[in-house]
Image: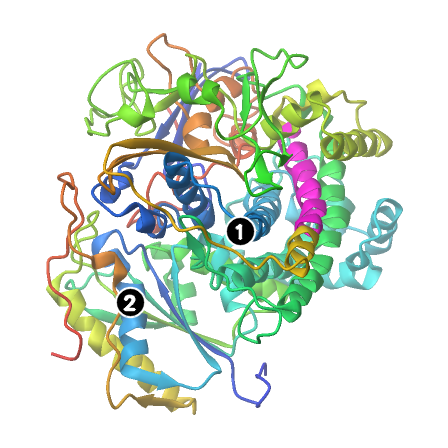
C-alpha cells in the first residue's frame, strides 16, 4: 500500500492538499485539506452593511464579483428589500459574463492539460485534425492553416527545451490517450480561449464600471445610470457594444468549448465510471427575471442520495428549507469546537493542531444540509435542472449526450454525469446555457429600458433591531451563500459558505467524508509517483482555495510536491 | 506596435496584491500613489487588479508596456524596492521565489506569448514585504517605499516617451481598505499601523 500526498493540487492558487492511500492500483482512502486559514469574514464585523460587498469582493482574487453579489443579496434579504428589474438584469449579465470567463479558463487553462498531451502535437496531421474539427463544429478557428500555426508554435516550444510553465505536465503518462490530432485541436482552442477570456472581462467591465473589482453595486440595486439620451450613461450605444461582444463570445462557447468537452468525453469513456462521490446535490435558483425575484432562469433544488427522480425544488431565495438545513461541522477542522453550527451563529476561532487524519486536518469547515454532505457545482445545477424538466437544461444536456455518442463515445444517460468526466461535461452544458441566457437577459434589459423604466436602485432603511439575512448565488463553482446578522445598522456576524467549502469539506462528526474525499475512492492510480488520475478527479470540481484566503508564498510551492510515503 | 487612436503606445500600470493582507497590498498602494502624484495621457491605464491569478492575461493582452507593482520574495531587507524585467522573471524561475503572485504572472505571460498577444515590454517593481498578516495595514518601510515606487514608475514612462507629469496638487489617495477599525470588531479587526499621509512626507 502506498500513501500519496499531493500539495498543492491547484495550479495557480494552491492551498489544497490531497492525501490518498493507494492499494492494488486504486484509492482506498482520501483526505482533503486546505492549508491556509480562512477567517477573512472577521474584517466585516462592525462595518456598515452598505459597504460590506466592497470588502467581500476581495475574499478571492478570481471570483471577485460572486462575493460582491452574495453580500448585497444577503443584506437585501435581511431588509426584505426588492431591487428594480433593471438592477436584476444588469447583475445577471455581470454574473453570466464572469461565469463564462471562469468556465472557459477552467476547461482550457486550469485542467485540459490533465488530458491533453502537448508533446504529441508535432506528430499530428493538421489536415486530418481540421477535418475532424470541421465534422463536428462550425467554429472558424479550426482551419488547417490555424492548426498548422499552432503546431509550429508547439514544435518551437518543445524544440527550445524551455517548456517553462508546461514543464510540469505528466507527459507520456499511460492515462493520456487522445490522438495527436485531438490534442492539437484542443490546444489550438486553449490559445484561442485567451481572446474570449478577455471579451468576457469586457462584458463585466462595461456593466460593472471596472474589472476585476466591479464598482456598480449597491444594497438596493446597481449604480448604473440609465439615460438613452446621455453619452455618459447606459445608453443604446453601450447596449449595442454588449450585444456585439456577446455575439462574438457565444460561438466560442457553443462551437469550441462545448464541442471540445464532448470530444474529450468521447475520448475518455472510462472516466464516466470514476469520481461519483457524494450523490446528494444542492443548487440554488439564480438569474431572476423579475424585480421581486419570483421567477428564475436557472432552477434550484436539492437531490438526496442519488435519487435523481425526486428533486425538492428551491423556488426562490426566501426558501425556508435551506435556512434551516445548512450548518457547518467543526469536528475535523482547525477551529475551536465540535459538531455543527448554523452559519448565523457560526464562529471562526482557529485551533491549529497539525495534520491528524483521525482528528483535525484542514482549515475548511464541513458544511452539511440536514446533516448530509452535498455536492455543489455545475453538475448539481445541470442535474437539478434536467430532473425538474427545465427546457434549456434538457436541450443542452441531450445535445451533449448525443454528441458524445456520435463521436464514438459511450451512450450516456443523464445519471452517468455523476462522475469525473460528467463534471467536465456539465460545466460545458452550463456554459452553453449561460451563453443563450446572456443574450436573453440583454434583451430583457433593453426592452425594459425602452419601455421607459430607468430605475436601478431602491434605497435601504436599516432598523434599530437585529435582523438576519442570507444571500444566495449559484456561482461558477456552485452554491454560494453569505449569512449576515445586522444589529443597529452594522454587521454583528458574517459567514460565507463557499462552494469549495461544500466540495472540499472534511469528514464530519459522524466520520462521513466530503465530496472530494469520497469521489477519490476507487479512483485508479497507475503510478503512485505520478498520480495524474487523482488530479483529474479533484480538478473536475474546479477547486479554488483562494477564497479560503490568499497567501504570501504561493510562488515557492506552485509545483505540486508529490510524496509517496 | 499596438497604439491607440492617436498613435500612442498602450501602457498599463498594474498593482497586484491583496489589500487585506498587510504589505501584500503594496501593488495597489504603489499604483494609487502614482495616480495621485502623476497625471498621464489617456493611453496609460492605471489598475488595481488584486490577486487575479490567470485572469491577469486580459490586462496584459497586446500592451506595449506593462509596469507591475507587487510584493516579491528576495533576500533583501524589508522595504527594499527590486526592479525586474521579463528576462529576470524567466531566469529566476528556477528559484521559484520572485513575487508572491509569480505563478500567475509567469503563466499569463507564457499563454500570451504563445498566442501572440504578449506585451512588448514588462517591468516589475517589487517590494520586499515586512509583514503580510491579515488586516495589519502597511509597515513604515513599505509605505515609505511606495512614494519612491511612484516616482520610479513615472521615470520609466517618461524614458519611453509616454506623457506623464507630476501633478501640481496631488490628489488625496483613496485607501478605502484602511478605514478605521469599526466599533465591535473582533480581535482580527482591521487596522492600519500608520495613518496614511495625503502627500509626500
Majority secondary structure of magenta residues: helix
Instruction: Look at the picture and state if A162 lies above or below A324.
Output: below
Query: Could you say where residue A425 lies in the image, as x and y percent from the top left?
Result: 68, 33
Query: Could you say where residue A542 lies in the image, as x and y percent from the top left?
Result: 52, 37
Q: How is the image coloured?
A: rainbow
Q: Secondary structure at mark 1?
A: helix
Instruction: Look at the picture and state if A436 lies above or below A467.
Output: below
Q: Residue extending furthest top?
A: A510
Q: Residue at the spot x=26%, y=52% of the render?
A: B20
Tell me if residue A243 can be seen.
Answer: yes
Quarter of the view holding residue A464: top left
Q: Secondary structure at mark 2?
A: strand
Tell me if residue A517 can be seen.
Answer: no
Instruction: Look at the picture and state if A495 lies above or below B4.
Output: above
| Magenta run includes residue B132 | no
Residue that mark 1 sits on: A87
Q: Nearer the viewer, mark 1 or mark 2?
A: 1
The chain that hosts pointer 2 is: B
Q: Residue extending furthest front?
A: A452
Task: Magenta stretch: give its range.
Answer: A421-441
Query: Could you say where residue B85 lies in the image, as x and y percent from the top left?
Result: 39, 73
Residue that mark 2 sits on: B126
Amino acid at each position: 500500500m502506498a500513501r500519496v500526498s499531493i500539495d498543492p493540487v491547484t495550479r495557480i492558487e494552491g492551498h489544497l492538499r490531497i492525501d490518498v492511500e493507494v492499494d492494488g492500483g486504486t484509492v482506498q482512502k482520501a483526505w482533503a485539506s486546505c492549508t491556509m486559514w480562512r477567517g477573512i469574514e472577521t474584517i466585516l464585523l462592525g462595518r456598515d452593511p452598505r459597504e460590506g460587498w466592497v470588502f467581500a469582493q476581495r475574499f478571492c482574487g478570481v471570483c471577485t464579483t460572486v462575493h460582491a453579489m452574495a453580500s448585497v443579496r444577503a443584506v437585501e434579504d435581511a431588509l426584505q428589500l426588492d431591487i428594480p428589474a433593471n438592477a436584476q438584469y444588469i447583475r445577471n449579465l455581470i454574473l453570466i459574463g464572469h461565469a463564462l470567463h471562469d468556465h472557459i479558463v477552467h476547461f482550457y487553462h486550469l485542467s485540459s492539460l490533465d488530458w491533453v498531451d502537448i508533446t504529441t502535437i508535432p506528430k499530428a496531421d493538421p489536415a486530418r485534425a481540421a477535418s475532424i474539427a470541421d465534422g463536428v463544429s462550425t467554429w472558424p478557428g479550426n482551419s488547417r492553416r490555424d492548426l498548422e500555426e499552432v503546431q509550429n508554435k508547439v514544435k518551437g516550444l518543445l524544440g527550445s527545451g524551455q517548456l517553462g510553465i508546461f514543464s510540469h505536465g505528466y507527459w507520456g503518462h499511460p492515462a493520456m490517450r487522445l490522438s495527436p490530432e485531438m490534442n492539437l485541436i484542443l490546444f489550438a482552442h486553449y490559445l484561442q480561449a485567451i481572446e474570449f477570456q478577455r471579451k468576457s472581462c469586457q462584458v463585466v467591465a462595461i456593466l460593472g464600471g471596472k474589472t476585476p473589482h466591479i464598482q456598480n453595486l449597491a444594497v438596493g440595486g446597481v449604480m448604473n445610470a440609465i439615460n438613452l439620451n446621455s453619452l455618459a450613461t447606459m445608453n443604446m450605444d453601450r447596449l449595442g457594444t454588449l450585444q456585439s461582444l456577446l455575439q462574438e463570445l457565444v460561438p466560442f462557447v457553443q462551437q469550441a468549448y462545448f464541442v471540445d468537452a464532448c470530444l474529450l468525453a468521447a475520448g475518455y469513456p472510462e472516466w464516466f465510471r470514476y469520481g461519483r462521490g457524494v450523490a446528494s446535490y444542492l443548487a440554488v435558483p439564480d438569474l431572476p427575471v423579475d424585480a421581486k425575484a419570483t421567477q428564475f432562469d436557472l432552477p434550484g433544488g436539492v437531490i438526496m442520495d442519488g435519487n435523481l427522480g425526486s428533486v425538492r425544488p428551491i423556488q426562490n431565495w426566501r426558501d425556508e428549507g435551506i435556512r434551516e438545513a445548512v450548518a457547518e461541522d467543526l469536528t475535523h477542522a482547525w477551529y475551536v469546537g465540535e459538531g455543527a453550527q448554523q452559519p448565523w451563529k457560526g464562529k471562526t476561532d482557529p485551533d491549529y493542531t497539525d495534520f491528524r487524519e483521525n482528528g483535525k486536518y484542514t482549515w475548511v469547515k464541513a458544511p452539511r444540509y440536514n446533516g448530509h454532505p452535498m455536492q455543489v457545482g455545475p453538475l448539481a445545477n445541470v442535474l437539478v435542472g434536467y430532473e425538474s424538466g427545465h427546457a434549456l437544461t434538457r436541450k443542452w444536456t441531450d445535445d451533449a449526450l448525443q454528441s458524445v455518442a456520435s463521436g464514438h463515445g459511450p451512450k450516456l444517460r443523464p445519471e452517468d454525469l455523476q462522475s469525473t468526466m460528467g463534471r467536465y461535461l456539465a460545466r460545458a452544458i452550463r456554459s452553453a446555457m449561460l451563453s443563450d441566457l446572456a443574450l436573453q437577459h440583454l434583451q430583457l434589459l433593453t426592452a425594459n429600458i425602452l419601455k421607459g423604466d430607468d430605475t436601478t436602485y431602491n434605497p435601504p432603511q436599516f432598523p434599530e433591531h437585529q435582523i438576519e439575512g442570507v444571500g444566495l448565488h449559484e456561482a461558477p463553482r456552485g452554491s454560494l451563500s453569505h449569512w449576515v446578522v445586522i444589529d443597529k445598522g452594522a454587521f454583528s456576524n458574517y459567514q460565507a459558505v463557499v462552494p469549495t467549502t461544500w466540495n472540499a469539506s472534511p469528514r464530519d462528526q459522524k466520520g462521513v467524508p466530503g465530496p472530494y474525499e469520497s469521489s477519490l475512492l476507487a479512483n485508479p492510480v497507475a503510478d503512485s509517483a505520478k498520480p495524474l488520475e487523482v488530479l483529474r478527479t479533484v480538478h473536475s470540481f474546479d477547486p479554488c482555495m483562494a477564497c479560503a484566503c490568499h497567501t504570501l508564498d504561493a510562488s515557492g510551492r506552485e509545483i505540486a510536491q508529490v510524496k509517496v510515503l | 506596435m499596438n497604439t491607440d487612436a492617436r498613435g500612442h503606445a498602450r501602457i498599463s500600470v498594474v498593482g497586484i496584491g491583496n489589500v487585506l493582507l498587510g504589505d501584500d497590498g503594496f501593488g495597489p498602494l504603489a499604483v494609487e500613489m502614482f495616480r495621485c502624484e502623476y497625471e498621464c495621457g489617456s493611453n496609460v491605464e492605471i489598475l488595481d487588479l488584486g490577486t487575479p491569478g490567470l485572469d491577469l492575461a486580459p490586462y496584459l493582452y497586446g500592451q506595449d508596456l506593462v509596469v507591475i507593482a507587487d510584493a516579491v520574495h528576495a533576500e533583501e531587507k524589508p522595504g527594499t524596492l527590486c526592479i525586474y524585467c521579463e528576462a529576470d522573471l524567466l531566469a529566476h524561475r528556477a528559484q521559484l521565489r520572485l513575487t508572491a503572485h509569480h505563478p500567475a504572472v509567469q503563466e499569463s505571460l507564457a499563454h500570451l506569448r504563445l498566442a501572440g498577444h504578449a506585451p512588448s515590454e514588462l517591468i516589475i517593481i517589487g517590494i520586499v514585504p515586512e509583514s503580510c498578516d491579515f488586516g495589519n495595514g502597511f509597515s513604515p518601510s513599505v509605505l515609505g517605499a511606495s512614494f519612491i515606487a511612484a516616482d520610479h514608475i513615472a521615470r520609466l514612462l517618461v524614458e519611453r516617451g509616454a506623457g506623464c507629469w507630476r501633478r501640481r496638487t496631488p490628489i488625496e489617495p483613496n485607501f478605502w481598505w484602511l478605514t478605521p477599525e469599526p466599533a465591535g470588531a473582533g480581535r482580527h479587526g482591521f487596522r492600519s499601523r500608520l495613518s496614511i499621509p495625503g502627500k509626500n512626507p
